[in-house]
Amino acid sequence: MGEYERKDCDQFLWQNKDREMVKVLMGLRGAGKTTCLARYVRRLEEAGVPEERILYMDLSDPDMQRFFPQEALYRRILAHLSGGRRAYLFLDEVQALPDFSRLADGLFRIRHFDVYLAGSGLRAALPALRAALPGRCLVKEVYPLSFAETASALPRPPEEADLLRYTEGSTLPGAYGRPDGRSALDGAVSAALFHEVLGSSAIRPGLLTRLLRILSPRLGDRVTEKDLAAAAGRAGRPLLEKTLRTYFGQLEEAGLLLPAPLVSIGEDGEAAETAGEGRFFFPDGAMTELWGKGEDLPYRLLRNALAVELCRRHGTIETAETLRGPVDFLTGRETIPTLWQLIPRGNGAEAKEKWEILQSAPEIYRKCVLTFTPEAFPEGEGVIVKPLLSWFLRP
């Protein structure tokens, strides 16, 4: 991991150092949260923080779990970091501690503590954490390696072919570019499924596997809950859509699924959510290798990589349907609403149609095209044309 720069996570930790906030890293297992914490600890030591004023605890370690519940762990932390001087506390894999938000609240009240939490499958626990720490909690989602991070290890300027290779392989730090990458990806995903998904009594392994095999070939396609429920059910007996949402919700909370719900945009620009329809993406495009690829459509994995990058920059994504037709992505609906079309080649079969759909969208939306051939699109048409390679390389 040391050969890749991870500026996004590094800056989040360093810029919020000593702020009276609890800092939280969350995301898929294997995305690099622990490594980011370790690098930050080294930076603290290099800045002169004494080793005895830094405490790192992995709460998934059975030796640490001897100190559960919170009260015993709290006393152990206080004993280690006594003295009233500034101390830095790192609790990793906090999801292993039931109701860890209570412990976080107690530790926050000790003014000389700078508290950092990290864990997988934390999405469902965030409301309780934010309720315990109202206005005092900063959350950073950690995704697998971005293209900019992988390009930082190249001995030359990155090229288009590098971006396409990036979209085709695993982007987990422990798997990217390695001969045993498939094995590393399989291990990380299996651990996430076992700990964060199958840990729920509502999830059955057989049905979970069937749903993943159904969903994987449809990566990035427009799908409806009704169609997926019919495909997952038995002859004449579709799966209940409520059950389908439960399984997808667990996968999303584990960081294994990135949903892009469908939003319908009217002539006046008003956006309305369309229940039960949208697109789904994986945080790592190579996850399709685990459950089966679909039709070998051009740039399917590039669109998945784009979805992940938009999530990294904007937090959430949606897909959109205008009166003229579909748009790949909608971001920032509550801030700067932006419509995104991926048109890799200006002379591609869909290029003209996708361009015209975007161009005709209501003026209240910012409109962007991402392409390898920006010269193929006219300027001054109300649409911003961004070169794909440089856009992915943006910090």
Image (tube, helix red, strand yellow):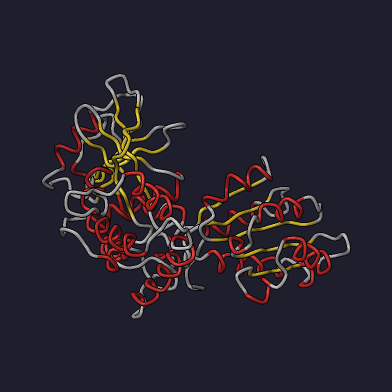
Residue depicted at x 70% and y 54%: 104
Q: Front-most of 294 and 71?
A: 71
Residue 365 x %, y %: 35, 29
Q: Residue lying at the far right in this picture: please name it.
A: 83
Q: Front-most of 143 and 353?
A: 143
Indicate the quadrant where residue 75 lies.
bottom right
Indicate the quadrant where residue 326 lies.
top left
Q: Is residue 367 left or right of residue 125?
A: left
When the figure is inspected, residue 394 is found, relative to residue 71, above or below; the finding is above
When the figure is inspected, residue 373 is found, relative to residue 205, above or below; the finding is above
Q: Residue lying at the far bottom in this picture: please name it.
A: 179
Q: Residue lying at the far top in this picture: please name it.
A: 268
When the figure is inspected, residue 359 is found, relative to residue 261, above or below; the finding is above
When the figure is inspected, residue 384 is found, relative to residue 232, above or below; the finding is above
Residue 200 x %, y %: 47, 58
Residue depicted at x 27% and y 55%: 215
Indicate the quadrant where residue 185 lies.
bottom left
